[in-house]
Amino acid sequence: MAFSRTAGVLTIVTLAIGIATAQDNPAASFRTFISEITPPGIDTGVRDNDPARPPRPYPTDLTARGDGTPYVRGSIIVKFRPGTANAARRVMITRVGASTMDAPSYADFDIVSIDRNADPEAAAAALAQQPDVEYAQARYLMHPMFVPNDPLYARQWNFPAIDMERAWDLNPGASPSIIVAVIDSGVAYRNAVLRRNIPAWQATDGVNEFTFPALGTVDIPFAAAPELGGPDRFVAPRDFIWNDTDPLDLDGHGTHVAGTIGQLTNNNIGVAGMAFNVRIMPVKVIDSIWDDILGSPAQGTDDVVARGVRYAVDNGAKVLNMSIGRSGPPSPLLLDALLYATQRGVFVSIAAGNDFEGANPTEWPAAYANQIQGVVAVGAIGRDRLRAYYSTTGPYVELAAPGGNQRAGGVAGGILQQTYDFSFTDTYVFGPSRYGPPRFDVFAYQFFQGTSMATPHVSGFAALLMQQGITSPAAVEAAMEQFATDLGPSGKDDEYGYGLINPRASLRGLGLAR
Amino acid sequence: MRRTAFVLAVVLLVPAAAQAQVTARVFADAGVTVFAATQSFKAVLGKPSGAVFGGGVEIDNRRWFLTLGVRRFHRSGHRVFVFNNQVFPLNVKDTITVTPVDLTVGRRFRWRGIIPYAGGGIGWHRYDETSDHATDAEDVSKSYTGYHVLAGAEKAIHRWLGAAVEAQWAGVPNAFGESATSVGQVYGEHNLGGFTLSGRIIVGR
């Protein structure tokens, strides 16, 4: 029986893993790397003759490590008003049945432990009613924003679609002085061998339950994506899922996104990236299925993402790429984190969301974009320059960029970048009988689609603009919007925002007469 | 307009020529122009003014004069982006060349050994703008018609040599600022003219 890694189909139902709350000491790693010397990554080329893959599982499966709720149980997030005494804080949390409180790093909020059987949303609502509480919320889970692909054959139509060839004449790929943080599932940025015990786990496709056997202690090889460049390319890596400084990608999403931002270009190999001279800061805030199987201490909740944002800002990033999001209620701590970024001169681009054909829900943190100058929410277009079928619409969509539309354009209508060869990573896809340890050192060029893929175009574009001389994030946004190619109804609209990004026009700016 | 100016010059000069001998002189001048589109020029070139150099020919009968002069302003800066009145120079070189050709009719006076003069006329202002990596359609090479008034004073240095200082105001309305990629549109500035203060050396009797 084919076992698919499809949205809402594969649900990990039991994992004997405790979820830690705040982890402030990255040296206290939960993982053991036995070697940093491994063979270079293997490139298996363009996956253009494979049978079509089922859509990849986001957004719903990764929310399921607990019990299928869109938040984690056992803790909530609270921010007290400045000056609130510790004693008063303790009294307030006791009133809602909370016990302990933890102040995580890179945060201006606390994580409060509550009973695992308690409803986090109810507890947060009760706590929010207390005096001196600025906000309280459940720890909602974020997920990557992409609708994956069926790898058939290769072509990067996305760069000509936004006139990048001529834009690179004006600014050839920015420079290493610009750091772009990829706040995502990690990046394949280094070689290592992880020795880890892989326990048994269970999953369901909604009808049948599957038990995957324990694999015991195995060595899992990792390699840097060959086309992302050497170690000098990466700055201040940080993993908030494993609480260490090794944000290795166990999914492939972050690596694909990083490629669109900064894939090595003009080297006669592989594909191109928008801002191919920038440095990349991998900041892992999203857990994948393998993170869950291997027992990561944290998940991709709002608080983890907010900490990742603040970490990236504090460590020199000038552009943040957030190809992630969730629906549900707003998140004040994410709003605070975005303001923290823009007030310190950092531009943020966020995926608008992929659930148009669902309920087209408001997506967070994207929906904060039109409240903050210097933060943009990015919708996706296909090769036909029309909104992709999945691309969420709403008043917060400010720009559109190529994200791919494989329904209209076939497999090659996706965005091509190098990431893992999923034959070697998704070993659970074909069920327990063919299940085995993963390898994260084999790469392929894969077509993905999603607003996740559109967003790094804008991040790379922002890096080029900053290199070009526009240093304020609000001005970067204005330059993007002023020169965008209007699509859809005239003027700003809910599908395309101000329109399709036009990097060359923005990089060229204004002359005296023309 | 050119025809009008020519007729005006003839009408003024022919009676004068009937009374006095007409002479021709040549001149060279150098000065500074402060452009009327102050903010636009400042944004792109770093300052709203710059040096101009030129020369021309003058026909006069001691009371009336007709001059045909040409000046050239040439300066490089950067293309820009303007947001909330903050100018961000972009890493794209932009070069502006303005070449006015002026036809001026004026009246000369005599006062304590110097010759004050005043006049006015029309000008044809050649405007060229080029920037790095621009297409032909993106570069600009156009001419605009304007008007000017001027006043100055001349002092004879030698029998064949004179010196003068001159102040000129030129207006060249609606020359730029219509394009969506013009900084003139941001500031609402459209006038290519400006104020020029120059010194002049005149050769001729």
Image (cartoon, coloured by chain):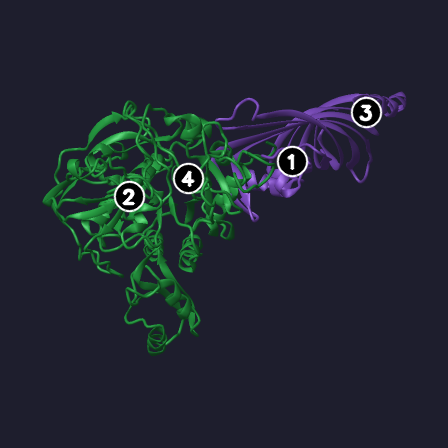
Chain colours: A green, B purple
Q: What amino acid type should be assigned to the residue bearing mark 1?
A: Gly
Marks 3 & 2, CB-CB < 8 Å contact: no
For discs 3 and 1, the disc positioned in front in the rendered view? 1
| Residue A90 drawn at (x, y percent) | 33, 75
Query: Closer to the observer: label 4 or label 3?
Result: 4
Query: What is the number of the mark on residue B177?
Result: 1
Amino acid carrying mark 3 in the image:
Ala
Cα distance in 3D space between marks 3 and 1: 28 Å
Quote the CA–CA distance across marks 3 and 2: 93 Å
| Residue B10 image offset from top left, x and y in percent | 85, 21
- The three-letter amino acid code for the residue at tag 4 is Thr
Q: Which mark sits nearer the N-terminus, 2 or 4?
A: 2
The answer to which of A352 and A462 lies nearer the viewer is A352
State the residue position of label 2. A207
Q: Please tell me whether mark 1 sits on a helix, a strand or a loop.
A: loop
Q: Nearer the viewer, residue A389 or A153?
A: A389
The mark found on residue A429 in the picture is none
Circle 3 crowding by C-alpha within 10 Å: few under 14, some 14–19, many from 20: some
Q: Quadrant of residue A298?
A: bottom left
Residue at x 41%, y 49% (from the top left corner): A346
Q: Residue tagged by mark 3?
A: B5
Q: CA distance from mark 2 to mark 1?
A: 67 Å
Q: Residues within 10 Å of mark 2 (few under 14, many from 20)?
A: few
Depth check, mark 3 against mark 2: the one in front is 2
Q: Secondary structure at mark 4?
A: helix
Q: Earlier in the sequence, mark 3 or mark 1?
A: 3
Disc 4: which residue: A451
User: Which quarter of the figure has residue A280?
Assistant: top left
Q: Position of residue B98 (x, y in %)?
A: 62, 29
Q: Tell me whether marks 3 and 1 sit on the same chain.
A: yes
Q: Chain of mark 4?
A: A
